[in-house]
Image: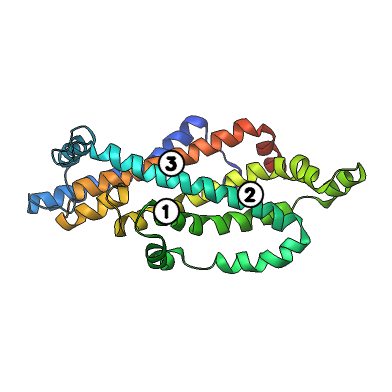
Amino acid sequence: MRLINRRPAPGVARLLALVPFVLVMVAYLIGSGIRLSENPSDKLLPSFASFAAAIDRMAFQVDQRTGDILLLVDTEASLYRLFAALAIAVAIGLVLGIVIGLLPYFRAGLGSFVAVVSMVPPLALLPILFITMGLGEASKIALIVIGVAPCLVRDVALRVGDLPPQQSIKAQTLGASTWQIVLRVVLPQTLPRLIDSLRLQIGPAWLFLIAAEAIASESGLGYRIFLVRRYLAMDVILPYVAWITLLAFLMDRALAILQRRAFPWFEAARASG
């Protein structure tokens, strides 16, 4: 049997999924052991005991200066900014994407503009946002929206344009208005595809958030990472990076579950297509 036709059993597939993580862990343990044996004060690759102490200090003990649990405060601040920005970006992406993909006049007027805007490096606009909007929450949220929304608009517009034209023709034959076509033909087929697009934008959204928090913020996961880097506190930085990765992964899984439960037909349609 050709290798392309071989499928691992479910148990084997789960085991194979764990292999890369185990290899990375073993490589870290080896590297950390070598460096610590040469220099017990080495901060580049801390031991797991150092990680445990740092996690306990950041996540389970009240900070004496602020009276807060730092990891909790940082997570709440970052997730507020991220969720607010993604909600705005999704609304913009859905509305403009459908309008551009469905209506020729809007496609002619806005299609090229959105394409050009999507090519602007969002991080290059960060100083402008801080100057015009200040150093508060608005500029950080705006950066994420600017970075994510144009990509969502373009992707939704392309997905709407790929819908079979026969569906629109049949709906018009039955007397449907443009608004009814949007609600009953375009929107139900666009929402699961929008979730796919949003899943792909989770990583960039976190990147823009951390960049904004690193430059001007008093709380947040990105702020904390760049605050402790001056002390070479890898025992704090690496757990924070792992925590951000876990949060992003959970967001991706939550969106996948939402898509599967809200649109059970979509997975079968994509497989058959």
Q: Relative to residue 63, is residue 30 depicted above or below?
A: below
* x and y percentages locating residue 33 in the rendered image: 15, 47
Q: Which residue is mark 3?
A: 249
Left or right of residue 140, residue 235 in this image: left
Q: CA distance from mark 1 to mark 3?
A: 26 Å
Which callout, 1 or 2, points at the residue further toward the start of the chain? 2
Q: Secondary structure at mark 2?
A: helix
Placement of the C terminus among the 4 image quadrants? top right
Discs 1/2, front: 1
Left or right of residue 29, residue 5 in this image: right
Discs 3/2, front: 2
Q: Amino acid at mark 3?
A: Phe
Left or right of residue 265, residue 229 in this image: left
Q: Which residue is mark 1?
A: 138
Residue under the image location 44 percent in, 52 percent down:
141
Residue under the image location 19 percent in, 46 percent down:
235
Query: Which one is in front, 67 or 251?
Result: 67
Query: Does residue 20 appear in the picture of this structure?
Result: no
Q: Amino acid at mark 1?
A: Ala
Label 2: few (<14), some (14–19) or many (≥20) C-alpha neighbours in 10 Å: many
Which callout, 1 or 3, points at the residue further toward the start of the chain? 1
Q: Which residue is mark 2?
A: 94
Placement of the N terminus among the 4 image quadrants? top right
Q: Based on the displayed image, in which of its 4 quarters is residue 250 positioned?
A: top left
Which callout, 3 or 2, points at the residue further toward the start of the chain? 2
Q: CA distance from mark 1 to mark 2?
A: 22 Å
Left or right of residue 2, residue 227 in this image: left
